[in-house]
Image (spheres, grey):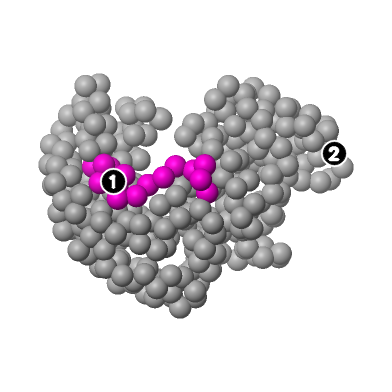
Amino acid sequence: MDQSLTTALLDDLCALIRKPFPERTEIRVWGMSGVERVTFPDGTTAVFKYAKEPFDREAQALRIAHQRGLPVPELHATAMQGTWLGMLMDDLGTPVRDADDLDGVAAAVMLHAARPAGGLPFLAASGLAALPGRALYHLQRLRKAGRWTDCDDIETALGKISAAAEARAQGATLDPFGWVHSEFHPTSIHIGDEGWHLLDLARAFTGPGLIDLASYHGTTETPSPVRLRVLLEQYVAAGGHEDALAARGGLTAEAWALGWHRMWAVEWFMEQAIRWINDPTRDFAYIPVVRRHLNDVVRLLEA
């Protein structure tokens, strides 16, 4: 991370709120974004978040979410330096506890009930059906660069999914359809002394809300349709739309949601590998994850 760039961003933000330059403490930093807690000379604090494309839409998403009455951190100022976005927002402090499944259900019900945001990317059946083809395109680019050359199995799996994709994508606009957080995990819900807030809306879009529920338990373990079915039933019981339990694309709701979430993740991983990060030294980590997810997609979508 270029320290001079983040310093310039923070300096611009401080000028906008008319405060002197603060002390900085890293919370989480990686190559494409970072989060810091900043402390001003008067003792007040804020969170400084910075990110580059494709994570540079978060300020827009936060403003829209705030207008819709969703509990998100309030923005104090935003600034750009080249392709980098910088934001100063409320410091919510240390969480009082971790979010559990019922917290996730309550957050999803509120998010999905909010009026959809017209300015966010849109994903429906045609967009879902295009994901395996987009992933194949990324694979072709990787191979042209002399990478991912021993991945015929990935190509075969994507071909199977492509053949089934149009039929399996049907039902994408069944409710809940609208806001999709897209990185919806327990860590995306901050529970503090003054209630809960949604964090990390950088990749929010308009689409099938089941994608959020399928992502909540993470992707490191084998996807469990039984576990997701329980979460979907809790979601409906908490006020979520009853169609969350409806079959779609010839599949159960839970298989559909898990399969398409994993396919969405695969396309994103492969785009990162060739476009956003484009670091051949990371291929050893990306390829096994893509293989594992694709095996799950073939099984879940019955491709």
Q: What residue type is labelled 1?
A: Ser
Question: How far from the left and from the top, in percent, is residue 29?
Answer: 55, 38
- Residue 274 sits inside the magenta stretch: no
Q: At 79% from the left edge and 35% from the top edge, which residue is drawn?
A: 17
Q: At 36% from the left edge and 69% from the top edge, which residue is drawn?
A: 243
Q: In this view, does 107 lie to the left or right of 176?
A: right
Q: In this orientation, which residue lies closer to the viewer: 99 or 89?
A: 89
**In the current view of this chain or complex, which residue is farthest to the bottom?**
237
Image quadrant assignment for residue 122 = top left
Q: What element carries label 2?
A: loop
Of the numbered discs 1 and 2, the one sitting upstream in the chain is 2
Question: How far from the left and from the top, in percent, is residue 201?
Answer: 53, 47
Q: At 18% from the left edge and 48% from the top edge, which residue is drawn?
A: 161
Which residue is labeled 1 in the image? 126
Callout in the foreground (1, 2) = 1
Quarter containing the C terminus: bottom left
Image quadrant assignment for residue 266 = top left
Which residue is labeled 2 in the image? 41
Q: Is residue 130 left or right of residue 237?
A: left
- Is residue 154 something that shows in the picture? yes
Q: Which mark is residue 219?
A: none
- In magenta, the rendered stretch is 117-132
Label 2 Cα neighbours within 10 Å, binned few <14 / some 14-19 / many ≥20: few
Question: How far from the left and from the top, in percent, is residue 139?
Answer: 23, 32
Cα–Cα gap, marks 1 and 2: 52 Å
> Is 32 above or below relative to 153?
above
Quarter containing the N terminus: top right
Query: CB atoms at circles 1 and 2 under 8 Å apart?
Result: no
Question: How far from the left and from the top, in percent, is residue 4?
Answer: 64, 22
